[in-house]
Image (cartoon, rainbow, N blue to C red):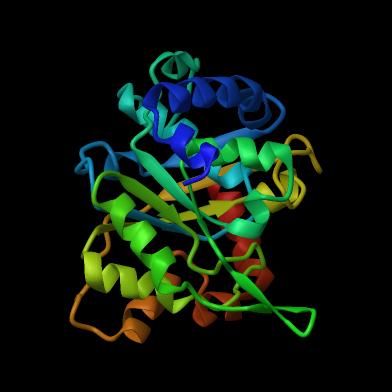
């Protein structure tokens, strides 16, 4: 186990990192831009383990950082808002997030974010000098299952920030095997406000929207394909939502405001 992974298992290290990252990122969410949160009533009384958050993906880091802010605020009994970030004095740390190994090794900042609970998985492999996308391998799946055994896990079924990209069956297999509480999340505006990594501003004054939906009603005996289709529809990344076109996206963001 690497030194980074060992450090990430210490609660104090994670609390300090959450507080540090939270202080620097809070203004970008609440002052430079405007964060609108909905549905925190669906996550207030969840069990402490075996909860899987599935979400669409728009930036490498801003999405996850925002989720961590919200989880910390909900721990302090805040509803659909962050308010004054005193929640960073004792942040919620029983959460992990799935991230591509190649992304988390790309810079010293991404390596630092590994301490916040990253479950690194290999999304690509080399063949004849070219990168080829692939699904989760068994060791990565076991890593996520172990995390669910003791905490919450955030995953992005598409594994990319490209909108309406197909979902990966690995998420469905984990749901079938672990039978977690599955909370779908829909985010909007992050691609407009931040660059792809989510660490630099692209357009200030943007409305950022995070909506937590009720726990999914899943038939765990369904096939992985059926479960994945249900998940993709819940996070509004299915073909049906894609066919609604840009008019739907703009209307949804307008309603969120």
Where 111 falls versus 7 (above or below)? below
Taking the spot 37% from the left edge, 85% from the top edge, the residue there is 225
Instruction: Work out whether 174 lies above or below 238.
Output: above
- The reply to whether residue 206 is in sight is yes
Q: Is residue 13 left or right of residue 147?
A: right
**Left or right placement of residue 191 versus residue 26 in this view:** right
Q: Is residue 78 above or below residue 209?
A: above
Q: Nearer the viewer, residue 154 or 57?
A: 154
Q: 252 or 158: which is nearer to us?
A: 158
Spot occupied by residue 73 in the image (x, y as percentages of width and height): 40, 26
| Quadrant of the rendering where the C terminus is positioned | top right
Where does residue 109 sit, x and y in percent of width and height? 69, 37
Residue under the image location 54 percent in, 38 percent down: 4
Residue shown at 62% from the left, 65% from the top: 160
- Give residue 65's quadrant in the image: top right
Residue 80's x, y, as percent?
A: 41, 33
């Amino acid at each position: 186990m690497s030194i980074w992974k060992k450090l990430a298992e210490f609660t104090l290290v994670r609390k300090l990192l959450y507080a540090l990252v939270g202080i620097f990122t809070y203004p970008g969410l609440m002052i430079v831009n405007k964060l609108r949160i909905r549905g925190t009533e669906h996550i207030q009384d969840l069990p402490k383990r075996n909860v899987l958050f599935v979400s669409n993906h728009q930036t490498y880091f801003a999405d996850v950082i925002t989720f961590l802010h919200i989880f910390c605020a909900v721990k302090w009994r805040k509803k659909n808002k962050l308010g004054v970030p005193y929640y960073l004095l004792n942040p919620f740390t029983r959460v992990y997030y799935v991230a591509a190994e190649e992304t988390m090794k790309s810079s010293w900042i991404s390596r630092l974010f590994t301490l916040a609970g990253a479950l690194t998985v290999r999304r690509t492999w080399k063949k004849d000098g070219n990168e080829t996308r692939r699904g989760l391998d068994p060791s990565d799946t076991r890593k996520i299952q172990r995390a669910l055994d003791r905490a919450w896990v955030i995953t992005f079924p598409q594994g990319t920030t490209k909108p309406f990209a197909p979902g990966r069956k690995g998420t469905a297999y984990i749901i079938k095997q672990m039978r977690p509480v599955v909370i779908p999340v829909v985010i909007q505006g992050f691609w407009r406000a931040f660059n792809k990594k989510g660490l630099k501003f692209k357009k200030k004054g943007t409305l950022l929207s995070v909506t937590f939906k009720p726990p999914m009603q899943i038939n765990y005996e369904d096939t992985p394909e059926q479960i994945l289709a249900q998940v993709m529809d819940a996070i509004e990344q299915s073909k049906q939502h894609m066919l609604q076109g840009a008019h739907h996206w703009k209307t949804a963001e307008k309603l969120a405001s």
